[in-house]
Image (cartoon, rainbow, N blue to C red):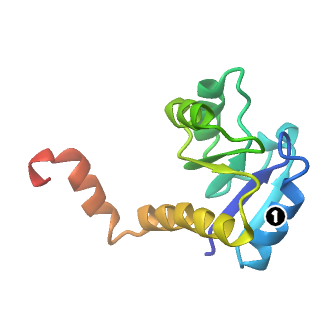
Amino acid sequence: MKAQLLLVRDGLENAAPSMARVLRDAGVNVRTVSAAELAEAAPADVVLLAIPAIDPVATCWALHRLGYRWVIAASASPSSQECITMLNAGADYYLDAWLSAAELVARVRVVLRFSAWLEDPIRTPLYKDVLTNSSSI
């Protein structure tokens, strides 16, 4: 089954339509929803959204509890400090919503590869062994 990305429009209103089009044109399976629809949406492998600065930790944990394994924080006005805050809050990746089309696709594909890699039953035990057996590092 092809990995699916859920793009949340809120906070990315001007960039979201372009991001969705670029990703779909590159063959990424993209669904778009509003933040209000997020809790009711069927979980996807990856969720891409602008995380509110009010309580990013609660937002990231809520997303993970809803079943989203990978959270990409996007910003229409990125900064190094915001990136650090979002990654420390629990986002798995951070990107500028206004990246060039090629860079946006490449960065999203990185996260989709990680998602697929962890779903691979052949590779997953190796990953778990590394995490639980520090002597193998």
Q: Which residue lies at the image location 56% right of the left edge and 40% below the top edge?
A: 91
Q: Position of residue 2 (x, y in %)?
A: 63, 74
Q: Which residue lies at the image location 72% right of the left edge and 20% below the top edge?
A: 54
Of the pair 115 and 79, the residue shown nearer to us: 79
Q: Position of residue 25 (x, y in %)?
A: 79, 78
Of the pair 48 and 14, the residue shown nearer to us: 14
Q: Is residue 109 above or below residue 89?
A: below
The residue that label 1 is drawn on is: 20
Q: Position of residue 132 (x, y in %)?
A: 21, 45
Q: Which residue lies at the image location 64% right of the left edge and 27% below the top edge?
A: 56
Q: In the shown orientation, is residue 65 left or right of residue 113?
A: right
Of the pair 125 and 75, the residue shown nearer to us: 75
Q: Is residue 41 above or below residue 88?
A: below
Q: Which residue lies at the image location 85% right of the left edge and 48% below the top edge?
A: 9
Q: Is residue 22 above or below residue 115?
A: below
Callout 1 crowding tier (Cα within 10 Å): few <14, some 14–19, many ≥20: many
Amino acid found under the numbered disc labelled 1 = Ala
